[in-house]
Image (cartoon, coloured by chain):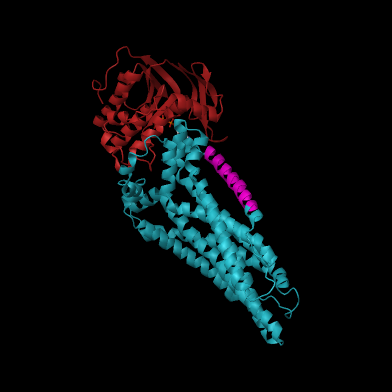
Amino acid sequence: MVVGIKDAAKLFVISIMVCCAVLVCTMFLNFNMDIAAIKDEITSETVMIFYNAQVSVAKVVSAVSGGCLLITSIIMLIFYIKHYVDIHKKELGILKALGYSNLKIAKNFWIFGISVFIGAVIGFCMAFIIMPLFYEIQNEDKILPEISINFHMELFGYFVIVPTFVFALLSIMFAYFRLKEPVLFLLKDNLQVAAKSGKHKKDKESKEKDCLFTDDLKSSTLKSRKTLTFFIIFASFCFSSMTQMSFSMTDLSSEMFAVMIILIGLVLAFTTLFLAITTVVNSNTKTIAMMRVFGYSQKECCHAILGGYRFISYIGFVIGTIYQYVLLRIAVDIIFKDISNVPEYKFDVPAMFISLISFIVIYEIIMYCYSERIKKISIKEVMLEY
Amino acid sequence: MIEAKEIEKYYGSKESRFKVLKGVSLKIEDGDFAVILGASGSGKSTFLNVLSGLEYADKGTVSYDGMDITKISDDKLTEFRRENIAFIFQQYYLLPNMNVDKNVKMGADLAGNKDYKSIIAAVGLGEKLNKYPSELSGGEQQRVSVARALAKKPKVLFLDEPTGALDEQTGRQVLDYICRLKKEHGFTIIMVTHNQNIAEMANTVIKMNSGKISEVYINNIQKNVYEIGW
Ligand SMILES: Nc1ncnc2c1ncn2[C@@H]1O[C@H](COP(=O)(O)OP(=O)(O)OP(=O)(O)O)[C@@H](O)[C@H]1O
Ligand SMILES: [Mg+2]
């Protein structure tokens, strides 16, 4: 067996993300469907306006947050399978060399669908647990008639069954395409890397005369995995934009909205960061182990492997700060255009500082955890695996 | 001087505990060329790893000039390896996503060695600085790992079947580079090998048998790499 439950378990980040996405979507869409049932009971015009507003808010929120989470989890899943195939290239290559067909190997990857299924089911159930409270808040002032909670089978289909199958299929397809590479590419370490980057290295050589090996390693780690760089920027971007937006939200809009935004931001930021850094460390275990054999200290290893990402994450933070300011500026200008006594929106400096400080603290804690993990890499085990 | 006293090493947990080293004692003088011979599974690699501080012994001590390395922390041990030791392995263990130049630089940096390119040239890879390990033949990869180890200017060089994956000619070449540099720098060599003939190059020969040293003898005449059989 190439892919086991254990590998799917490592995908729990995806589960968390899917869980959140399904939770948000189910809650709002279920509300939408239930609220539609009371449409006929509405008589007055003002209530109708309120009704329409509720419907469109529910739609927008589920589309934006749910869609955002869903897209991210799709990207991450694809990325994870790519990574999985990359680090298990040898085993896959051996199976292929022995004569297993690509499809036969790729079929094993359906198991990744399970982690999606688990996340989706939990999200779906949680949505129903939170729903009574949510319905109450939505209809706090009792403007609308009592809305009762109904179970909609089609939602279960859309948010649990369909994603599971789509993701399972996606996994198989993706693995299949990766496996199409020639056996030798799979069996040999980084033949492609070599082929790709072999040429343009030459002209640079003269420049990097006096820098240390660890610096070389730092820059080559950064360069060799551009998707990861993107993910780390994305993670700090989510953190900075969502937390700051949420602070401003409390003034501009409802608290409920603010809480949701901050939760989504944190989930996105942590899951992406976790996945990205885990990948960085995993794909460098050999290098780290050999460096330790030769006597590089844990600190030097961490500096070389992880140090390069610190600056990048700050870039993400800055982009996120600018993004949320521009977005809110525009939103305030458009939405509150016709309304009098608009809440004044200014760049929220204290919020930025709170967000920045918590970002730095959390980032350093996470990096510390990973450096402990690097310390625990067993030299002997890595050598046996080579 | 390296001194191992009554080393024991176990693998596995309680029930399936398996004694790999059953009380091994040994003395190796500075500048020695020691060869460890023995059947497969007799614990040669394990002994080498314990001697070099890659693994902790369960019992016994290993001391370098009187300093016991079995009692120091992992960080201290790493520092010790950094200052004193280099390795060459049968499986090369090169860094897969670094080119030849960077692979050797990894060793050279630790000794502050700026002149490591001359060592790459000395092992005949001057033309292949920008190649990646996957683009090299087995013999070339092993020469990179030799260059990496020697660029570190170690006091003790540990080799675990360095020629195990090489044919006769490349094997001899690799040993030749190592011996030449040993003459120049005078480091200590401790080598595990399956090849009986290589033992004739050494001055101390250690034979291991199921976790114990069964015989140690001194060669008065050391042959050079082209005089031995293969
Ligand atoms: N990490 C490990 N866990 C459990 N047992 C191990 C481990 N490493 C080695 N062994 C066992 O210890 C014994 C000695 O292994 P070692 O690698 O030292 O032998 P060796 O003399 O180097 O053999 P070879 O010549 O084949 O390399 C073997 O029986 C092996 O199965
Ligand atoms: Mg061995």
Majority secondary structure of magenta residues? helix
Instruction: Place residue B212 in its image quadrant.
Output: top left
Residue B223 located left or right of residue A362? left
Q: On screen, A28 above or below A356?
A: below
| Quadrant of image for the C terminus of chain A | top left
The residue furthest top is B220
What is the display colour for chain B? red
Q: On screen, B204 above or below A364?
A: above
Residue A291 located left or right of residue B168? right
Residue B109 located left or right of residue A373? left
Q: On screen, A130 above or below A207?
A: below
User: Residue B118, how many percent across, how many down?
Assistant: 30, 29
User: Residue A236, how many percent across, how many down?
Assistant: 55, 53
Residue A380 located left or right of residue B219? right
Front position in the image: A183 or A18: A18
The residue furthest right is A141
Assign ligand 1 to one image quadrant.
Answer: top left
Residue at 41 percent across and 48 percent down: it is A223
Tell which chain the image draws in cyan. Answer: A
Q: Is there any visible trace of residue A64 in the rendered image? A: yes
Residue at 52 percent across and 40 percent down: it is A374
User: Residue A356, how many percent across, how many down?
Assistant: 61, 51
Instruction: Place residue A143 in its image quadrant.
Output: bottom right
Numbered range of the magenta stretch: A353-376
User: Residue B67, how many percent across, how many down?
Assistant: 52, 18
Q: Is residue B53 magenta?
A: no
Residue at 76 percent across and 75 percent down: it is A141
Front position in the image: A253 or A53: A253
Q: Is there any visible trace of residue B37 in the rendered image? A: no
Instruction: Place residue A204 in its image quadrant.
Output: top left
